[in-house]
Structures are given as C-alpha cells and as structure tokens.
Image (tube, rainbow, N blue to C red):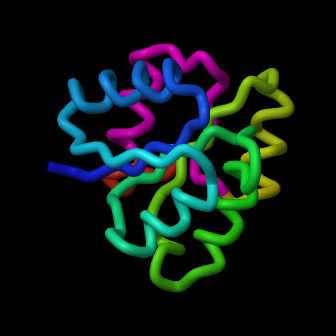
Amino acid sequence: MPQALLADDDFFGREISRLRLEAAGFSIFLADDGGQALAAARARTPDLIVLDAHMPGMDGTEACLALKADPATAAVPVLLLTACPPEEAESLRRSCGADACLSKPAEPRALIATALRLTAGGGA
C-alpha cells in the first residue's frame, strides 16, 4: 500500500483529500503545515507528498523547495494543491519544483488520477 503525506492547514480540506486518497488505496499520514510536513517526510519517506500551497508558517511551496533540495526526499513526487487559478498554479508549480499541481478544491477523479500517476512514476 503506497504511503502519502498530506499537509493542509484546513481541517476539512485535509479530511476530504485524506478520505479520497484512502479510498484509492493510499495509507495517509498528516501534517498541519510545511514545517511538520518536512519533518514527517524526512522521518518516514512517503511514496507521495501532497502539499497545500498556502499555509501559515512554512507554506507548501517553501516545503517543496526544501524537500526537493534534500537528497533523502528529492525523488519523492510532490503534488501541490492551490486556490490559485490554473495559469498561476502552473507557474507556482514550476517555481517550487512540484511534480504536479491541482487547483482547490481538487476534483476527486483528478486528485486520485494524479496521485496514482505520480506514484507509478509517470510524472506530471
């Protein structure tokens, strides 16, 4: 069973994403912000990291930059979730090195399909 780290400061958004990913066969562990996500990813390297782009403290883009700079986590695919419109989301994705980006609220099939593609090694 693939493991996914899910970081989002919004409880309801995090729970919806968690339930959808669990239904697709992922084992989920949670973080409330980018700093917690960074520590959790380094402690138990997941198969996928899903980050909310905008969180207080260390946000998802900063966490993604740190994860991609760390040899221990650089190869783990990162899916960035953002409230930005699609054209801004793509720019945000490129700027932090995320493997994929979806606008929030993520459509359930898109979230699952993207997560499965990233964990199968298919990239964005």
The answer to whether 97 is drawn above or below residue 108 in the figure is: below
Q: Which residue appears farthest toward the left when viewing the image? A: 1
Give the number of callouts.
0
- Left or right placement of residue 22 versus residue 4 in this view: left
Residue drawn at point x = 39 percent, y = 39 percent: 115
- Left or right placement of residue 9 versus residue 30 in this view: right
Residue drawn at point x = 56 percent, y = 37 percent: 8
The quarter holding residue 116 reads: top left
Image coords of residue 110 (percent x, y): 46, 22
Indicate whether residue 88 is drawn in magenta.
Answer: no
Image coords of residue 18 (percent x, y): 36, 30
The answer to whether 1 is drawn above or below residue 14 in the figure is: below
- Left or right placement of residue 24 versus residue 115 in this view: left
Image coords of residue 50 (percent x, y): 50, 44
Q: Nearer the viewer, residue 71 or 62?
A: 62
The answer to whether 55 is drawn above or below residue 103 in the figure is: below
Image coords of residue 100 (percent x, y): 59, 44
The quarter holding residue 80 reads: top right
Residue drawn at point x = 50 percent, y = 18 percent: 12
- Left or right placement of residue 67 versus residue 72 in this view: right
The quarter holding residue 79 reads: top right
Segment tinted magenta in the rendering: 98-117
Q: Quadrant of the C terminus?
A: top right
Residue drawn at point x = 29 percent, y = 43 percent: 28
